[in-house]
Image (tube, rainbow, N blue to C red):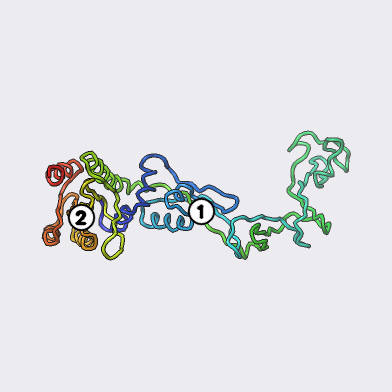
């Protein structure tokens, strides 16, 4: 059952896009959502884009699920963004600290252990071998005859040498040049389903899915979740909407309310009544798991909402057989 204070997650579980996305985790299609790098657009989450139908809302969608505690995340990468256009298509240039040209040549410093002579590796090269320019001895064994003493760079423009180049960045999209001081660094995350909410999600699926299947098997057209337009023109979401083929105008709606304490309180009753008032279904059911509070029962009776109290889907199905199928 949901714990107190987790109503935000309960509302998210009812959203169609959230249900479609989380179903990928529950089915095993996704165990960890990892971003995919696109050279043109940067990191993307194709599985989320497939659910939402667009890319602009992906980051906000994942943040909502993370902030609600539905998803956990780990740092996957840090990405440089252009401060001018926001592009992730960035080239890094290592530049000469004197003339700022990126036309530099990188080499290794080598020290001849025996005589102590040190120079860049290319000056030791002779006829495919390493030969000390000072004493003319051939160097055969690394860390015995010679050792690497570091990196040495030479600028091909001004001719100066140095050990540490200066990094600069070029945006391939807008051609802006910028340094570390100006760049924007953003975190990129991989996501997993929080262990603590798996039972919550499974509870919702365990109730809605078998009820949907049961009603379909008994001749009802079923939508779950269902989005119905009311007299006001607004769309309202119900966990389930069902009607028979020859009675399309006489629809039955259902919402599942899971207790955050010992019993479902008044809020789900009020929410269902507000939707009923605009949609005007033939029947409205509130499935309360495991039960409805006494005040909420009185309110449901006043609003003409039929209540089914149940601990599991089997109990709900038994009640629906009496109330709907045998009519």
Q: Nearer the viewer, residue 283 or 111?
A: 283
Residue 198, image x and y in percent?
Answer: 32, 46
Asked if residue 256 lies left or right of residue 91, the reply is left
Secondary structure at numbered mark 1: strand
**Neighbour tally class for label 2: few under 14, some 14-19, many 20 plus, Cα within 10 Å:** few
Asked if residue 38 lies left or right of residue 46, the reply is right
Quadrant location of residue 279? Answer: bottom left
Secondary structure at numbered mark 2: loop
Residue 239, image x and y in percent?
Answer: 26, 51
Residue 99, image x and y in percent?
Answer: 78, 62
Asked if residue 17 lies left or right of residue 121, the reply is left
Q: Furthest residue to the front?
A: 246
All told, the count of numbered labels is: 2
Asked if residue 58 lies left or right of residue 7, the reply is right
Quadrant location of residue 110? Answer: top right
**Neighbour tally class for label 1: few under 14, some 14-19, many 20 plus, Cα within 10 Å:** some
Residue located 32% across and 52% down the image: 13
| Residue 107 seen by the camera | yes
Residue located 67% across and 55% down the image: 92
| Marker disc for residue 261 | 2
Residue 98, image x and y in percent?
Answer: 78, 62
User: Which residue is the site of mark 1?
Assistant: 188
Residue located 74% across and 43% down the image: 148
Pick whichever of labels 2 and 1 is earlier in the sequence.
Answer: 1
As measured in the structure, the alpha-carbon distance from the residue carrying label 2 to the one carrying label 1 is 37 Å
Marks 2 and 1 in Cβ contact (< 8 Å): no
| Residue 258 seen by the camera | no
């Amino acid at each position: 059952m949901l714990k107190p204070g987790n109503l935000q997650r309960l509302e998210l579980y009812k959203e169609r896009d959230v249900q479609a996305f989380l179903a990928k985790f529950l089915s095993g299609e996704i165990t960890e959502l990892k971003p995919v790098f696109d050279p043109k657009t940067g990191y993307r989450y194709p599985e989320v884009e497939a659910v939402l139908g667009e890319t602009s809302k992906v980051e906000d969608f994942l943040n909502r699920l993370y902030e609600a505690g539905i998803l956990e995340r780990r740092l996957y990468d840090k990405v440089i963004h252009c401060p001018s256009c926001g592009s992730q298509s960035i080239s890094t240039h290592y530049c000469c600290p004197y003339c700022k040209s990126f036309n530099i040549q990188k080499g290794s410093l080598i020290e001849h252990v025996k005589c102590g002579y040190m120079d860049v590796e290319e000056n030791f090269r002779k006829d495919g071998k390493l030969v000390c320019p000072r004493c003319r001895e051939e160097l055969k064994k690394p860390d015995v005859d010679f050792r690497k003493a570091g990196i040495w760079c030479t600028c091909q423009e001004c001719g100066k040498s140095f050990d540490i180049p200066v990094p600069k960045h070029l945006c391939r999209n807008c051609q802006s040049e910028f340094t570390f001081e100006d760049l924007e660094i953003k975190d990129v995350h991989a996501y997993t389903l929080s262990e603590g909410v798996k039972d919550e999600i499974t509870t919702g699926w365990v109730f809605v899915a078998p009820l949907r299947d049961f009603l379909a098997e008994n001749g009802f057209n079923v939508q779950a979740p269902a989005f119905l337009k009311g007299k006001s023109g607004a769309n309202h979401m119900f966990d389930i909407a069902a009607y028979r083929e020859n009675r399309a105008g006489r629809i039955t709606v259902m919402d599942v309310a899971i207790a955050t304490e010992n019993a479902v309180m008044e809020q789900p009753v009020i929410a269902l009544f507000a939707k009923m008032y605009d949609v005007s279904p033939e029947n409205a059911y509130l499935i309360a798991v495991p039960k409805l509070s006494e005040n909420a029962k009185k309110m449901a009776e006043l609003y003409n909402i039929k209540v089914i109290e149940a601990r599991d889907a089997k109990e709900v199905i038994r009640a629906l057989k009496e109330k709907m199928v045998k009519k």
